Image: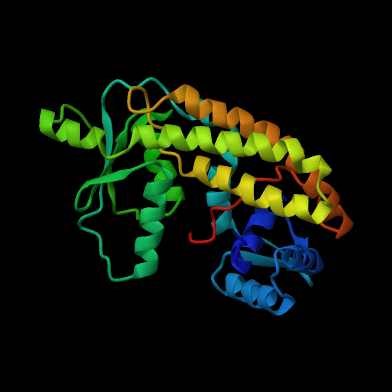
Amino acid sequence: MAPRAQSLILDLLSAVGGRPVPVRALVRAAAVFGIEENALRVALARLLSAGKLEQAERGAYGLSSRSRAVQDHVTSWSTLHERVVAWRGGWVAVHVGALGRAQRSAVRRRERALEFLGCAELDPGLWLRPDNLAGGVGATRRALRELGLDGAALVARLEELEPASERRARSLWDGRALERAYHETRRELEQSGARLDALPLEQAVAECFVFGGKAIRQLAFDPLLPEPIVSADARQALVSEMRAYDRAGRRVWRRFMRAEGAPALESVLDFRSVEAT
């Protein structure tokens, strides 16, 4: 599926670590996906107005500090295993029931932050996730707020749920569906990676964007659930395959972006999830 202009811009800027990229490089990349120059320039203006971009110099744009908080989360996909610890049965609870819902943009930021950290809504206004992230509740609270959760939201540890609530909490996530998705995406990456070098450059660029982007988005939003809710081995197998795909895709995108005068890529496929933040 072809990306929208705003998504493509944010994706490409994320891929170069947020550093400024010349408009001509963005225009050329957009053309690969059938996005016209006028549409790209309109998207640039809207992102700039929304505070997601900064104009570093004439004719070049980079990510704003606001967008970089999300980017930092997205780019941690390759070290997901370092973000989890053994689960001892406790939960991180986030209560947002007392917060207003009148401002849709604020609600979107709030819910996006909760989804980024793998939280799910148990009851209206009460979100949970297993307390298995490194650093415990304190680190989870900080991460949520950096990603856009309101400062007034209550974040605390919750233990000893009654049996019925415990069962409901564990059923908030479909572990088997997550495992199937890990296997499916891993297979797609294997197949795409095997043919990348044989494709024409622009076709290879588009394929990297589609398949790598899907995997990165999947990992960025992965709830990082513990055993026995989901298989950690299946998740890590996808991460390992994505590392191999990243190396192959990095070669493709470096050739393309350097030809257009853009900075060398740091991590070519760290993208596809920041547009709606």
Q: Is residue 43 left or right of residue 193?
A: left
Picture residue at 41% right of the left edge, 59% below the top: 109
Residue 136: which quarter of the image?
A: top left
Residue at (82% x, 41% y) in the render: 197
User: In which quarter of the view is residue 186 placed?
Assistant: top right
Residue 165 located left or right of residue 50: left
The vertical placement of 161 against 222, above or below, is above
Which residue shows up at 43% across the image and 32% down it? 179
* Most foreground residue, 94 or 138: 94
170 relative to 41, above or below: above
Q: Residue at x 37, y 26 (%)?
A: 226
Pick the quarter of the image with the N terminus. bottom right
The residue closer to the viewer here, 246 or 263, is 246
Q: Looking at the picture, does residue 20 appear above or below residue 129? A: below
Residue 106 in the image: x percent, y percent?
37, 64
Q: Position of residue 188 (x, y in %)?
A: 60, 39
Let me know if residue 162 appears in the view: no
Residue 15: % across, % down? 69, 50
Would residue 168 be visible to someone looking at this image?
yes
Q: Position of residue 48 (x, y in %)?
A: 61, 71
